[in-house]
Image (tube, helix red, strand yellow):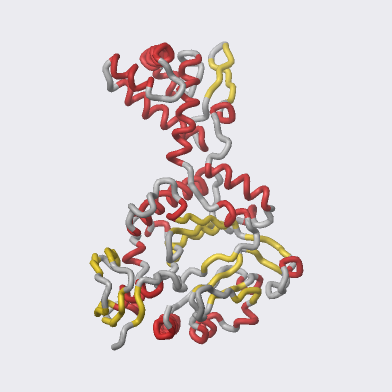
Amino acid sequence: MEERTRAYLRGRFGDYYRRAEITPPPDANEREWGYIPWTSGPGTTMVRHESLLDLGALEDFLARERPRHVYFSAGRYESPSAKSMSEKNWRSSDLVFDLDADHLPSVTLGEDSYAEMLEKCKGALMRLLDFLDDDFGFEDTTVAFSGGRGYHVHVRDEGIQELDRESRREIVDYVRGIGLDADTLQTTEMRGNATARVIPTEGGWGRRVHRRLLEFVSEIEALDDEAAIERLQELEGIGEGRASTIYGAIRENRAAIEAGNLEAGGVGIRTLVETLVHETVAKENAPIDEPVTTDTNRLIRLPGTLHGGSGLAVRRLDRDELAAFDPLVDAVPETFVGHEITVEVTDGGEVELNGDSFTLPEEVQSVPEYLGVFLMTRGRAEKGPE
């Protein structure tokens, strides 16, 4: 990045911060703070081990320093500005989740557009929130668009604050479905005069697998006999004989299957459930970034600040906003809208931003400022002469 580009961006970030109203997290004075300035050179330098006492009033600090990125810690400390973690004296930590579009199995890098990647990431976010709300019953959660490639969720319920890394890893394993199989899901209950193996149908992974089972059963019931047997044989570990057994169980024991009874149809239904567990985990897990959640000292982006790699705002989101939220429109800062600037595009191509689509040749050209900021922060353009 050229010095003229860096100076321009730092100045305009400062204009944004002078107008922005940014709410600090709870217990802000007990947290470590960090930021990345607009330094020269190929790399970036993190300034960290700061407290709000060191930075001063948050609004004044942001307007004065005009940082490229701003972070605060999930952890709370007795001495947040101490230079080593052991000296900080850890007290508690939020539970933080990070979803990054680049890491989603459903995203094909080089083929999916930025907008497509972010839309898939929002789908993963909704699955994560389903786990946090319904499976864990967390109540104090904050959702934020990261300003870059995904979303952050902060959980601040009192019951999770003192969990250690291993306990947090268990939560990670649960939402990712790691180690889940039919044996871990099933329980035994008295059904009539006999003990039966059943799959829970009211909540958790049992509900998800059972829902998928009923969807699959409905799919089979809509087929003729030959097509149904062929469809069953498409599943791993199910041959023609087992397929016939399962098909018979589906036709004769629909009510038992709806009740979660794995004994309906004998070993056939159990085999079907074992196969569908893996399929359900693949489709319905939340592919979060494990190190972020297990790290009790993690630094995470401050909602309301700007992302120095996109020029977009880190947006805190209410739950009723999520369905309609479009990050490439709703996270574009108003400060950068309504102006044209000159840039030299060095990496052209297609860009979707603020509701418009642009095809950019590699040349000096006039573009909307929000687009120019986006291109410059992503290393695809330099500031041109006005």
- Residue located at (56% from left, 45% from top): 136
- Residue located at (33% from left, 25% from top): 218
- Residue located at (62% from left, 78% from top): 52
Residue 151, x across and y down, in percent: 46, 58
Foreground pick, 323 / 45: 45
- Residue located at (70% from left, 68% from top): 77
> As drawn, which residue projects farthest toward the bottom?
386
Quarter in which the N terminus is drawn: bottom left
Question: Does residue 352 appear to the left or right of 189 in the view shown?
Answer: left
Foreground pick, 43 / 102: 43
Count every numbered label the image shows and give the total. 0
Task: State whether residue 231 is above or below residue 164.
Answer: above
Question: Does residue 342 appear to the left or right of 44 in the view shown?
Answer: left
Residue 379, x across and y down, in percent: 40, 72
Image quadrant of residue 293? bottom right
Foreground pick, 256 / 45: 45
Task: State whether residue 127 is above or below residue 302.
Answer: above
Residue 368, x across and y down, in percent: 27, 77
Residue 114, x across and y down, in percent: 35, 59
Question: Does residue 365 appear to the left or right of 61 in the view shown?
Answer: left
Image quadrant of residue 351? bottom left
Quarter in which the C terminus is drawn: bottom left
